[in-house]
Image (tube, rainbow, N blue to C red):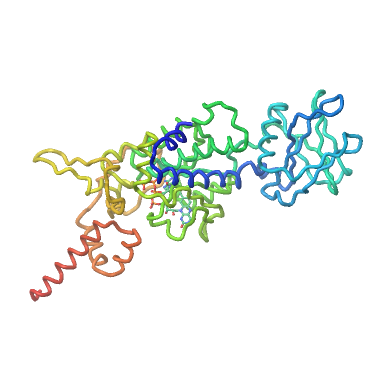
Amino acid sequence: MEIDSAIRNCGDRRLQIKYQNATYVIRRAFALYEYAGFPSSICPLALVLGCAVGFCFLSFRIAIAISFASYGHASHLPATLTSPPGGPPDITTRRPTRHHHQASLSGLRTVHPNQLFAMNSSPCGRTVTVSGSDEDQWFVGQRNQSWTPTWLPPDARMPEFQQVAFSFNGGKDSTVLLHLLRAGYFLYQKEMGSFNGNMDSVLKCPIRTIYFETTSTFPEINSFTHETAASYDLQLDIIRLDFKSGLVALLKEKTTKAIFLGTRIGDPNAVGQEQFSPSSDGWPPFMRVNPILDWSYRDVWAFILTCKVPYCILYDKGYTSIGSIYDTDPNASLCIPHHSGNKETFKPAYLLSDGRLERAGRVKKPASKNGNVPIMSNGLMNVNRHQNCSFSASIIAVGDEILGEFVQAEASRGELGRAEVSLGEYLASMSEYLASMGE
Ligand SMILES: Cc1cc2nc3c(=O)[nH]c(=O)nc-3n(C[C@H](O)[C@H](O)[C@H](O)COP(=O)(O)O)c2cc1C
Ligand SMILES: Nc1ncnc2c1ncn2[C@@H]1O[C@H](COP(=O)(O)OP(=O)(O)OP(=O)(O)O)[C@@H](O)[C@H]1O
């Protein structure tokens, strides 16, 4: 897998550790929220998935299916299994691990590509035997518990990535996260013994992906997001609502237990978050998974450049953190002084040496004449981002606040760029100077 090899061979110890930690968080999230249940339509069945383990006993071959999936409540399952009456001598095993589950799932797919069987807990005798084909006999025997076998139609099979989603917006942080997810998916498959050696399957990552698209999104970001989703077979859901309403609608439509985000410490919205953080009060319930929470600006670029992954072209034009067209400019610290008559140019984002200036290009500008950013869009509209902006108004609007301590405190939490702080300090010293002049 190209990402995994690039990191292993790069010699950047810090990046290697960041990568290991992030992919560990991703694998934990897969283990916690994926492969752990069926779609909600067949909940609350306590489900047992069959598995095929080649087993030779006396003169005939029996495949024993033992695998549990219980919608994330594996601890409620019995620890031992016994074979049914008339079957071979008791086979007792410990509670299957996720490893068994994975092995069994792939085994089952091989033997019964179109069917899975599941058991519910209605009483029907002490044990049951489920017959498969002529060659294979499937059974699950269990003490103190009885099961009714239910054959599930093929479309009830649990596809991977049913319950987690990836929030992708084409920005650099979510680009890094995309490739970490691909690497994490590959490592997880290997760990579970279900990697089939087909490298094509790891070049892609068919994870459910959500993208909140607005008319104030940069067209470059928009096209990068769509192209990237197509390149990696992401299952893209485009949401044209604000974050909260969009998530409410999403959770109504699809079971979503966890969402991966490219949030990093330093983002204003990262305050108080951990790698696993439940959504805030008043938000629909899901787990926010932040695998790169502790990554710095430098780490992000080290990863992108080391792994040579494509990123949005705006970062080559001096943008270092991208919000909407109305509040984002190239970062002034990357400006290349222009000769007369020449257009201003900017160095690429990865040359920003002080990561604390990352959000310096996030400036406050009015969104439009009436102050509203329309939500509905086909996402492909090329908007003139400077139309309706009034720069002098924005300076007057923030000037008073900048002079106050409130803004200093906010700025230290990353709410405002350092550029605004310097401006504030400048205005403050000017006002002191004017006061001393008797103004
Ligand atoms: C998938 C997703 C989940 C979010 N969950 C929460 C949440 O639980 N609580 C919250 O206050 N904001 C939540 N937000 C909003 C973000 O904290 C933040 O406002 C948004 O990502 C914009 O960040 P930006 O200003 O850096 O572009 C969520 C956003 C997304 C995309
Ligand atoms: N419009 C959106 N659609 C989907 N996810 C989003 C959207 N906006 C933000 N997110 C999620 O929130 C995370 C943090 O957003 P943030 O803007 O800080 O990072 P970024 O866009 O990836 O990179 P950059 O800081 O360079 O803009 C993103 O990585 C993504 O997971």
Question: Residue at 67% across / 31% down in the picture?
Answer: 106
List x then y, in percent, for residue 67.
73, 39
- Asked if residue 364 is positioned above or below residue 166 in the image, the reply reads below
List x then y, in percent, for residue 324.
34, 47
Q: Give the total number of marks visible in the rendering.
A: 0
Question: Residue at 46% across / 60% down in the picture?
Answer: 272
Farthest residue, direction right: 86
The answer to which quarter of the image holds residue 425 is bottom left
Q: Quadrant of the C terminus?
A: bottom left
111 left or right, relative to 249: right
The answer to which quarter of the image holds residue 42 is top right
List x then y, in percent, for residue 46.
74, 46
- Asked if residue 122 is positioned above or below residue 236 in the image, the reply reads below
The answer to which quarter of the image holds residue 231 is top left
Decide which of 381, 399 is in the foreground and name it: 399
- Asked if residue 91 is positioned above or below residue 56 in the image, the reply reads below
List x then y, in percent, for residue 407.
29, 65
Question: Residue at 60% across / 28% down in the picture?
Answer: 196
Question: Residue at 47% across / 40% down in the picture?
Answer: 180
